[in-house]
Amino acid sequence: MILYIDRSEVPDVEDISPEVLRWCVQKAEAANGRYDRLNDYYLGKHPVLVGGKKDDVKVAVNYAKYVVDITRGYYLGEGVKYDANDRQSHGTEPKAAGDVETAGTLAQGEAIDLSPLLACYDAQQIGKVDSKIGKRMGVFGDCLELCYASSDEEPSPRSACIDPRSGVLVRDTSVEHNKLFALLWEKRERTNGSTYYHVTVYTDRTIRSYEAESLAAASFKGVNDPEEHFFGAVPVIAYENNDERQGDFEQIIPMIDAYNGLMSNRFTDKKKFVNALLVFYGMTLGEGDQKVIAEEKTLDGVPIDAKVEYIQKTFDEAGVQVLADTTVREIHKMTLTVDMSDEKFSGNSSGQALKLKLLTMNLLVKNKIQQMEEGLKERLALYNNWLVTASRMKPFSVTDVDVRFTVSVPINEAELVQLVTQLQGIVDDQTLLSQLWFIKDPAEAVENVRRQQEEKQQAYQASFGLPTRSDTDEEEAEQ
C-alpha cells in the first residue's frame, strides 16, 4: 500500500522513530481487510458458498478471476520490449525521470547499450515478474516491486513482486509525493509460540531491519546495522491500477454476488424438480411397489380411475435466463471487458469491426499501460544506477528508452508484413522490425541484417577478385 506522511515527521530517513514505524504497520494492518476480501473473490471464495440450507446448491461463477486474467493477458501476454532511441547519441543532455538520477552521460555520438541491463532481465525471466505485477494490480488496485541484489557469487540486480498486504511505500505530502522510505513487514511466530513484528526499511541509500514484540507501544528496535544497496533511490516501486487504486472487479462485486445467488437458486430449483413428490390418487401402493417403481419406472394393476402426478414447484426458466444474460452483459459493460463466449462477438466480422468491439478493452489497457510504464521506467533507472556503480554499464536517461507493450489481438500477418515493406525508406529499420510479431529484439535484428549484408558484399567482391575488408586488415597488420 501507499501512505503519505509529512516530511517533518521523518527529519532523517536513516533514523526513523519507532512511533513512525508503528503507525505505518498499524495502517497496513487496518487496510488488509479490504485486500483479503478482494483476494478471496479472485480465488473463488465467495459469500454464496457460506451458510444456507443443507440441500441448497451453492454455485460461484468466478467473474472476478475472469476479468483480471483476461485483461492481464490482453496487454501482458507478450513480454514488454525496450528500445533505445538515438536522442542521446546526438548530444542531448540526459535527465533521469522520477526519483532516480544517474550521474554522468554518454559521449556524444555514442549509442545507448542496454544489453547488460536486459541480460539481468533475461536471467530472472522478468516477464514473469511483470505478469505478477499486472495480476496484483488487477486484484488489489496497487502493488509494489522490490529491487534487490541477488545472492549469486557475482551479484546482479533482481526484482520481486510484493503483496500490498506486506509492503508499504511512504511518500511525502508535497504535490510531487516524493518517496521517503519503504518497508516490508510481517508478523512472525517463534518456535515457542510467541509472535513478533519484523520490519525491513529501505531508504534511498540503506537497508535495515527492526523488530517489535507488539504494536501496543513504539517498541521497534534495530536488529542489524544499515547496509548500502547502491540503487541510488528507494528500491521499491509502486504500481497503481488506476487513480482510485481500485481492482478490476471491485466495483462489480454486488453484481457478482447477485449472479451467484441467481445461479444457485436456479440449480436448487432444478434439484427440487428432480426430487419432486410423487402422489397417487384412488389407490394404495402395496408392499414392494415402491421398489418396483424405482427400478422399473412402471407399475402394473393400477385402477382405471386412479391418477398419478408429481407435486413440484413451477418456475419461469425463460425469465431466469433473460435475467442471467442481462447480468452477464452488465458485468462485461462495467468492467470494459469483452465476452469472448458471445456468439455475436466474432461471427463474420471484419477486422475493423472487431477493433470497434475491442475498443472498450483497448481504452482500459491503455490506462493500465500508462500506469505500468511509469514503474517500468523507474525500474530501468534503478537497475542502471546499480550496474553503473558496479562498472558494468554506462549511465543513460530513461527518457531515451522506449517501453513497448504488445496487445494480444488477432493480426493479419500478411497485411502487417506488406505495411512494413511499404514503409521502408520512410521509417527507420528498427522501428519497422519492432512491428513484426516474431521479432523479440529489434536492435539485434537490425545488427544481424547489417552484418548479413556486409558478408554478402564481401563474398561478391571476392568472387571478382576484388580486395575485401579481411584482405585490407591483413595488409595493415603486416605494415
Image: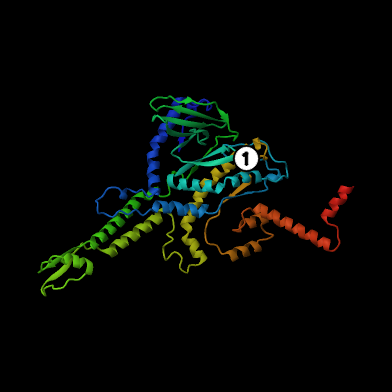
Disc 1 is placed on an element classified as: helix
55 shown above or below 199: below
Q: How is the image coloured?
A: rainbow
Q: List the single residue furthest toward the bottom.
A: 304
At x 50%, y 61%, the residue is 355
Q: Is residue 377 left or right of residue 187?
A: right
Task: List the residue tagged with mark 1.
Answer: 384
Spot occupied by residue 219 in the image (x, y as percentages of width and height): 43, 24
Residue 101 at x, y percent in the picture:
61, 36
Is 351 located above or below residue 60 in the figure? below
Q: Residues within 10 Å of mark 1 (few under 14, many from 20)?
A: many
Residue 20 visible in the picture: no
Residue at screen point 65% across, 37% down: 388
Q: Is residue 291 above or below residue 25?
A: below
Residue 22 located left or right of residue 443: left
x and y, in percent, of residue 173 in the image: 48, 33
Identify the image quadrant of residue 436.
bottom right
Badge count? 1
Identify the residue at horizontal 52%, vertical 65% (top origin): 351
Q: Amino acid at mark 1?
A: Asn
The residue closer to the viewer here, 261 or 180, is 261
Given the current orientation, which residue lies at the most extreme right position? 479
Left or right: residue 391 versus residue 231 is: right
Q: Position of residue 314 (x, y in %)?
A: 22, 63
- Residue 341 seen in this snapshot: yes
- Front-lying residue, 127 or 23: 127
Q: Quadrant of the N terminus?
A: top left
Q: Residue at x 40, y 56 (%)?
A: 333
The residue lying toward the viewer, choosing from 256 and 448, is: 448
